[in-house]
Amino acid sequence: MNSISIERITEILQRMKKCKIMVVGDAMLDRYVWGVVSRISPEAPVPVVEITDESNRLGGAANVANNVITLGAACGITCVVGNDNVGEELASLMRSRGIDTSGVIYDEGRPTTVKTRVIAHNQQVVRTDKEVRTEVCGAIEESIIDVALQSAETCDAIIISDYGKGVITKRLLSELIPKVRRIGKIISVDPKENHFRNYKRVSLITPNQFEAGAAMGRRIHDEVSLHEVGWEIIDLLEVDSLLITRGEQGMSLFRSDRTYRHFPTVARHVYDVTGAGDTVICSFTLALCAGATMDEAAQIANHAAGVVIANVGTASVTPEELMSSFQSRLDQI
């Protein structure tokens, strides 16, 4: 198996800095409550977490956009937030990272999505979600479609980050995908099962192993079932490429030209997979924009994922971390 050279990685990373990406999808705020546990509550058999710190991070589509920025490219976002304090906080946090928030749409009828994770001793104790998952409609949907279609003209690629929180609709997909393909741009999708059959003819789709199997009504449990599901998705959706992420087993790339390649994980330790899918689709798409082949883009995405799952909490990867990961791998050969 040919491995990408350091020189080639350097070239692709430099080209990424000239790219512009638009992320369309479900943005959310990730709250982290950090603490320690030293006793069990006398009120119920649950741990008492003594809080030592709290932090807010970009989640969902906002984390995808943050990953684009961290890798050195320009990025805007089309998303919906509530007309509330959390929505302002989320938009402000995105702006502070250099994300173009002119496509953020405020909806009076829904709260901003917030996921709160309580973590003690580097382990998640509980997660609470505040959200409305009903799909947007009416004037809000019209606004999303208008902004997304306009963005397609000025960016190099569009990433659809579908977390099933209501921003991605069948109508949006039916109008956006054909236009992006018609003007020769890249469109990538991090999918949800309920929209799976509406992602037809995209450039790239990146389900995890469970999502891919569920979409085809079966469970992937070995190489045979993996290949059956992979080629079924390629044929059903008529996509250019399908990247199935498989956790500790790495990721598998299926292409419309009927070629296949598996990439074993490069992660030495797995601490937290939160946000790994965001990093995968971002790094893969950006690499393609920078002129990488499908195989090269998959290798870059594989190393990017290996970096972020070694961190606790939603994370992004820098060019320097990517280079270090590739260099460490070469040093082991």
Image (cartoon, grey):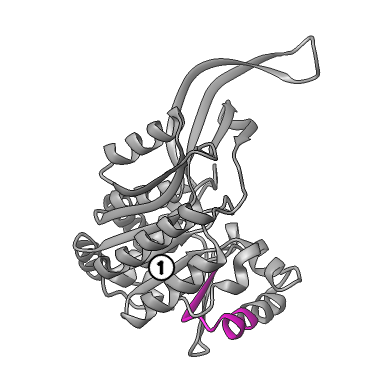
Q: Is residue 117 left or right of residue 302?
A: right
Residue 233 counted in the magenta span: yes
Tell me what residue is drawn at x 39 percent, y 31 percent. 89
Of 8 and 279, which appears nearest the observer? 279
Q: Is residue 228 above or below residue 286?
A: below
Of 241 and 76, which appears nearest the observer? 76
Tell me what residue is drawn at x 71 percent, y 66 percent. 214
Residue 82 counted in the magenta span: no
Q: Amino acid at mark 1?
A: Gln
Quarter of the picture containing the N terminus is: bottom left
The residue at which mark 1 appears reads as 299
Can the viewer see residue 15?
A: yes
| Residue found at the far front of this picture | 139
Report x, y in % for residue 71.
29, 54
Give the crowd class for mark 1: few <14, some 14-19, many >=20 residues within 10 Å.
many
Can the viewer see residue 303?
A: no
What span is colored magenta in the figure?
231-244
| Residue found at the far top of this picture | 42
Report x, y in % for residue 119.
57, 28
Quarter of the picture containing the C terminus is: bottom left
Report x, y in % for residue 331.
34, 59
Of 282 and 132, which appears nearest the observer? 132
Tell me what residue is drawn at x 46 percent, y 54 percent. 139
Report x, y in % for residue 300.
37, 64
Q: Secondary structure at mark 1?
A: helix
Tell me what residue is drawn at x 51 percent, y 55 percent. 138
Residue 326 falls in which quadrant of the image? bottom left
Q: Is residue 64 left or right of residue 214?
A: left
